[in-house]
Image (tube, rainbow, N blue to C red):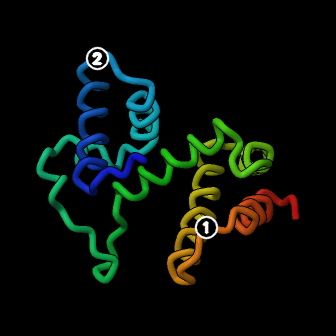
Amino acid sequence: MFNPSRDQVRTFFIDAWRKHTGREVLTPLETIAADILQNHPEYHALVEDPEAVDRDFAPEDGQVNPFLHLSLHLAIEEQLSIDQPPGLRAAFDAACAQRGNRHDALHDVLECLGETIFNAQRNNAPPDGLAYLTCVRRRAGLL
């Protein structure tokens, strides 16, 4: 099972962006990461700084971890590509129609995924796919 370290994840995004801006050949996963980064210009300076690998983003200081945000986007793209949990793609399509913007709909799904992960960690349990899907459906106006 692939379990990258914090630094490996951060380096992946930094390298994907460097390769994208340098017009180098990207792997399929790097292409997805570069597409995500294109929708987040607020993170461009960060991923253009190789020292960002070592930065801390403390929630106590009111900081959002941009690498976590990007990683959740990447996870959602993978989930949508395989429709996991089943029904996620249809709920996401409804969210896109409701929001009128794919990126805004992705952020709705991201909120649900973050909540699902938080609850799983808090309850020391596996993520609840049904609760996740229900949250996405609720945000899409399907419930």
> Which tag, 1 or 2, sits closer to the chain's start?
2
Amino acid marked by disc 1: Pro
Amino acid marked by disc 2: Arg
Q: Secondary structure at mark 2?
A: loop
Q: Secondary structure at mark 1?
A: loop
Give the residue furthest to the left.
51
Q: Which residue is mark 2?
A: 23
Please say if 136 is above or below 12.
below
Query: Where residue 110 sits: x, y (%)?
Result: 57, 58
Give the residue furthest to the right.
143
Query: Where residue 120 sits: x, y (%)?
Result: 57, 74
Q: Is residue 58 left or right of residue 113?
A: left
* Tag of residue 127: 1
Q: Is residue 104 left or right of residue 90?
A: left
Residue 41, quarter of the rendered image: top left
* Label 1 close to label 2 by CB (< 8 Å): no
Please say if 29 is above or below 76.
above
Q: Which residue is at 32% across, 49% downward?
A: 43
Q: For this rendering, which residue is in front, 98 or 135? A: 135
Q: Is residue 27 left or right of residue 52?
A: right
Q: Is residue 133 left or right of residue 38?
A: right
The quadrant in which the C terminus is found is: bottom right
Q: Which residue is at 63% across, 58% downward?
A: 108
* Tag of residue 89: none
